[in-house]
Amino acid sequence: MTKLRLTTPLLFTLLFLLLLGGLWRMDASSDRILNGIMKLGWLVALMWPPSAGGVLPELLVSLMESLAMAFLGTLLAALVALPLALLGAGNIVGNIFLRFSVRRLYDGLRGIDTLIWALIFVSAVGMGPFAGILALAVPDIGVLSKLFSEALESADKRQVEAVRAAGANRVLAVRIGLIPQVAPIMLSQILYTLESPNSYQ
């Protein structure tokens, strides 16, 4: 305990010195920061009050279209991610090769930026909201699949064992004993993905 008490302040001091060294190396002086804040305030002042002129209805329609694309893209991603997460969860799928392959699929889907997916789908299905929905959904499938599978693996095994002991098969045990445990976590992850900036690019 005494060693831990001595190590923690030393570690924080080292991290603080590392931060100061990084700021010094990047020339993040107080004058540059103050000038940047003043320029940012000037930019905000130019933006207020907003003057949309006659294009306000068009802006509102575009805003609603962006929200609809984000919602549908996230919903599509969640629907596809759930079965992929079941295939990638170690407490559901025992085949290590299948599980490894599915998890590498997660990496591939989320490893490519949304903008790249947008270019791919625009060339495949043309310009429009549909291409945007697909471009938002595909990387989110990789993210949600990984998060869902980790939530499934961290669930309490005793509930699944109790359902199996009552005579349920493996599929029913997953549906009754496992999914309800992680459903609130999955829902929070879906909402976070919907709120993320990538959903509105």
Image (cartoon, helix red, strand yellow):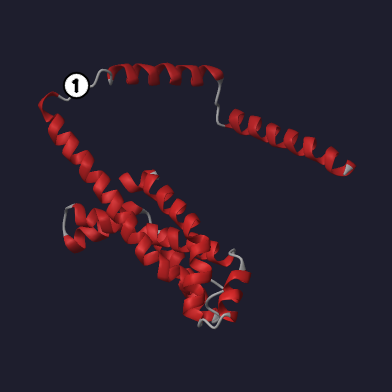
Which residue is pictured at 38% across the width and 57% down the height?
140
Quarter in which the N terminus is drawn: top right
Instruction: Give the residue number, with chain letter if any, for mark 1.
Output: 51
Which residue is pictured at 45% across the width and 63% down the height?
145
Inspect this view and state whether residue 116 appears.
no
Which residue is pictured at 40% across the width and 45% down the height?
196
Q: Position of residue 81 (x, y in %)?
A: 40, 65
Foreground pick, 87 / 172: 172
**In this view, which residue lies farthest toward the front?**
166
Foreground pick, 31 / 127: 127
Q: Position of residue 101 (x, y in %)?
A: 48, 75
Picture quadrant of residue 51: top left
Does residue 64 appear to the left or right of 189 in the view shown? left
- Relative to 21, residue 73 above or below: below
- Relative to 103, residue 13 above or below: above
Element under disc 1: loop
Foreground pick, 45 / 160: 160
Foreground pick, 94 / 165: 165
Quarter in which the C terminus is drawn: top left
Q: Position of residue 200 (x, y in %)?
A: 31, 44
Does residue 68 appear to the left or right of 84 in the view shown? left
Inspect this view and state whether residue 95 appears.
yes
**In this view, which residue lies farthest toward the right?**
2
Q: Position of residue 191 (x, y in %)?
A: 41, 49
Does residue 143 appear to the left or right of 44 in the view shown? right
Q: Amino acid at mark 1?
A: Ser
Count residues near mark 1 (Cα–Cα under 10 Å), then give few for <14, some for 14-19, many for 20+. Answer: few
Does residue 1 appear to the left or right of 20 in the view shown? right
Which residue is pictured at 32% across the width and 57% down the height?
75
Instruction: Tally the marks.
Output: 1
**In this view, which residue lies farthest toward the left?**
54
